[in-house]
Image: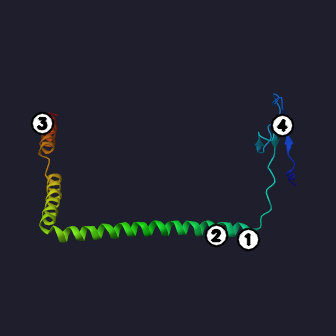
Amino acid sequence: MPRRKSIETATLDPEGSKIGEPVPKAVIDRSTASVGVPRQPDHGLGEELSALRQQIDTLQRQILDGARSVKGGAGKAMRQTEAAVKLYPASTLLLVAAVAAAFAFAGHRASLPRRRHQSALREVRNFYDTIRARI
């Protein structure tokens, strides 16, 4: 049968530990010079659940407040964009065309074949074929 755990706490030696003394397997509290697991308050399961529910409610409120502020910011940006398009339709059209051209140019540059690498690969293949033909 396993030993029962002691709930009493022993005080630490103020002079320090001695060589060869066994190290206790417990919590060492330096402020009170005690060794052992401190007694836990007897909370009921209902109290713990109510504390967790309060924390969950607080988190839900914080998330809802954050979502409302993001939604409000997005709505404000949308209204400002609509106002800018109504006030400056030609400038907006030019801006959209410039952005589309920049994306098209970047896509075209990325899709261009790399001829230098293909020629280098071709040269390596030719060199390999000549070495192979000599062997």
Residue 71 quadrant: bottom left
Q: Is residue 69 left or right of residue 80?
A: right
Please report whichever mark, 3 or 4, sits nearer to the chain's N-terminal start.
Answer: 4
Q: Name the residue under label 4.
A: 12
Cα distance, mark 2 to mark 1?
10 Å
Which-is-in-front pick, marks 3 and 4? Answer: 4
Cα distance, mark 1 to mark 4?
37 Å
Cα distance, mark 3 to mark 4?
84 Å
Q: Name the residue under label 3.
A: 130
Which-is-in-front pick, marks 3 and 2? Answer: 2
Cα distance, mark 3 to mark 2?
79 Å
Q: What element carries label 2?
A: helix
* Image spot of residue 105 (x, y percent): 14, 55
Colouring used for the render: rainbow
Image point 85% across, 51% down: which residue? 5
Please report whichever mark, 2 or 1, sits nearer to the chain's N-terminal start.
Answer: 1
Q: Is residue 55 above or below residue 29?
A: below
Q: Mark 1 points at which residue?
A: 46
Residue 53 bears which disc, if any? 2
Q: Tell which of 21 and 2 is nearer to you.
A: 21
Image point 87% across, 48% down: which residue? 8
Cα distance, mark 4 to mark 2?
40 Å
Q: Is mark 4 on a helix, strand or loop?
A: loop
Image point 58% across, 67% down: which residue? 58
Q: Tell which of 20 and 6 is nearer to you.
A: 6
Q: In which quarter of the image is the N terminus?
A: bottom right
Question: Label 4 sits on what residue type?
Answer: Leu
Residue 47 quadrant: bottom right
Q: In which quarter of the image is the C terminus?
A: top left
